[in-house]
Amino acid sequence: MAVPQNRKTPSKRGMHRSHDALGNPPTAIEPTTGETHLRHHVSPTGFYRGKKVTRGKDE
């Protein structure tokens, strides 16, 4: 079993985890309604890539 010979300091541990921070999810703008939604997801009004695919929340 692998065991580190020397302890990693808190500073180096923080540097090791520097890329683990969460960023903002990528969003897209629906061309027909102008709404912002998650990429590759249907917009809240039911449009996907300019076409009506489902009923929206208000319908």
Image: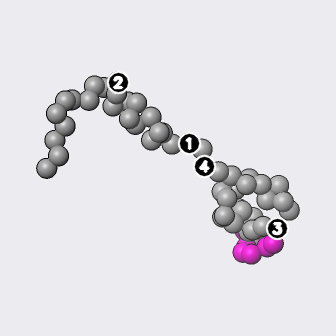
Q: Which residue is painted at 77% across and 54% down in the image?
A: 29
Depth check: give the residue in front, 21 or 4.
4
Q: Name the element at disc 2.
A: helix
Query: For mark 2, what is the residue?
Result: 11
Are discs 4 and 2 less than 8 Å apart at CB?
A: no
Q: Which residue is painted at 34% across and 27% down in the image?
A: 12
Are discs 2 and 1 less than 8 Å apart at CB?
A: no
Q: Which residue is painted at 28% across and 25% down in the image?
A: 9
Are discs 1 and 4 less than 8 Å apart at CB?
A: yes
Q: Name the element at disc 4.
A: loop
Query: For mark 4, what is the residue?
Result: 25
Which of the two discs, 4 and 2, sits closer to the camera?
2
The quarter of the picture where residue 35 lies is bottom right
The magenta segment is 51-56
View extreme (right): residue: 32
> Residue 57 location in percent, x, y?
70, 66
Query: For mark 3, what is the residue?
Result: 50
Q: Is residue 11 left or right of residue 38?
A: left
Q: Which mark is residue 23?
A: 1
> Residue 24 location in percent, x, y?
60, 44
Circle 3 crowding by C-alpha within 10 Å: few under 14, some 14–19, many from 20: few
Q: What separation in Å lies between label 4 and label 2 (alpha carbons)?
A: 28 Å
Q: Is residue 1 left or right of residue 21?
A: left
Q: What separation in Å lies between label 2 and label 1 (alpha carbons)?
A: 22 Å
Question: Which amino acid lies under the numbered mark 1 shown in the image of this protein?
Answer: Gly
Which of the two discs, 3 and 1, sits closer to the camera?
1
